[in-house]
Amino acid sequence: MGEDQGSASLHHRGTEGAEITEQGITWIAGVDGCKGGWFRICLNLQTNELRFNVIQQVTDLYKLTPSPSIIAIDMPIGLSDCNPRACDKEARASLGPRRNSVFPAPIRPALTASTHAEASAITESINGKRISAQAWGIYPKVKSVDEALGKHKELRSILFEVHPEISFWAWNKRQPMAFAKKRGEGQTERITLIEQWLGPKVVDQARSRFNKTLVANDDITDAFAALWSANRVPQGEAQTLPEYLETDSTGLPMQIVY
């Protein structure tokens, strides 16, 4: 449990089990994986209050107070049984120089693997491709999200897949960011967009509350990018890659929301 620290249009899929007020949605969240677990930023749409958490369990992303009605997460959700996902292909095509930030999502049969070698062998036997060590690094978190969505059906109406670089691309008038996110210049250009939206020093507020060994600088800016996309859902402004709805064998959407 974490402790509280302080394109076609997309139609919202319902919010059963989430915190709603008579005026509509109160809390939304942007989430990025981090060394400490999951870094979550919650925004109150009525008051503009921000809250920051590091959370361990996927289900706590929506159960831990404040309980968001919409959660945008930087993690693949719908998984192909064989071929690369259309959303990943379109994201790479859109991002140009930032295309390498889009790792291939696991194919569903490889999600059972316990080692990189095993996952790579399974993938190669099905589609002829091996997986990089970097891509393997996200498998445990992908699996935890997938298991939570399987066990807690209400989460399917709340959780939306995003990719921070696609969020920043859309935010930046459909232009890829000029610099990689881990470079100083890359952080500056991303923070500029965030502060134009939420005010000066808002990233510093988050940074000051968490050790860098748990939450890296780019985890924070990525979570803000996810939050920006989450905010577009209730506004009726959210769009998707691809434009059409593609679902996997379990019925989960294979779409990147922005």
Image: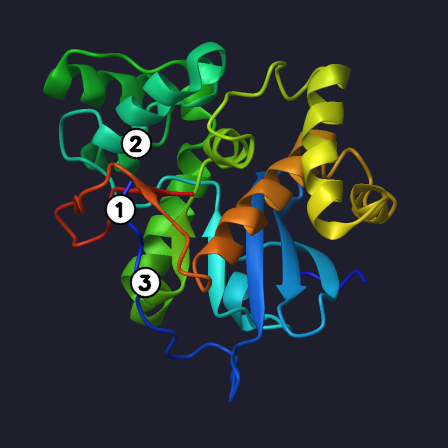
SS assignment at label 3? helix
Residue 189 is left or right of residue 241, and the answer is right
Rendering coords of residue 199 (x, y %): 79, 49
| Label 3 with label 1: CB-CB less than 8 Å | no
Residue 230 is left or right of residue 52, and the answer is left
Residue 5 position (above or below residue 221): below
Q: Local crowd at mark 2 within 10 Å, few (<14), some, or many (≥20)?
A: some
Q: Which residue is drawn at 53% across and 84% down?
A: 23
What residue does disc 2 label? Answer: 113
Q: Residue at x 51, y 67 (%)?
A: 62
Rendering coords of residue 223 (x, y %): 61, 44
Separation of marks 2 and 1 at Cα, in angstroms: 35 Å
Rendering coords of residue 101 (x, y %): 48, 20
Q: Which amino acid does label 3 sit on?
A: Arg
Nearer-the-camera pick, 61 or 10:
10
- Image quarter of residue 150: bottom left
Point out the tag, 2 or 3, that comes first from the N-terminus.
2
What residue does disc 1 label? Answer: 8
- Image quarter of residue 183: top right
Point out the tag, 2 or 1, that comes first from the N-terminus.
1
Residue 176 image label: none
Q: Which amino acid does label 1 sit on?
A: Ala
What residue does disc 3 label? Answer: 156
Q: Residue at x 39, y 74 (%)?
A: 15
Separation of marks 2 and 3 at Cα, in angstroms: 24 Å
Q: Local crowd at mark 3 within 10 Å, few (<14), some, or many (≥20)?
A: some
Residue 150 position (above or below residue 195): below
Q: In which quarter of the image is the N terminus?
A: bottom right
Q: What residue type is labelled 2?
A: Ala
Point out the tag, 3 or 1, that comes first from the N-terminus.
1
Q: Local crowd at mark 1 within 10 Å, few (<14), some, or many (≥20)?
A: few
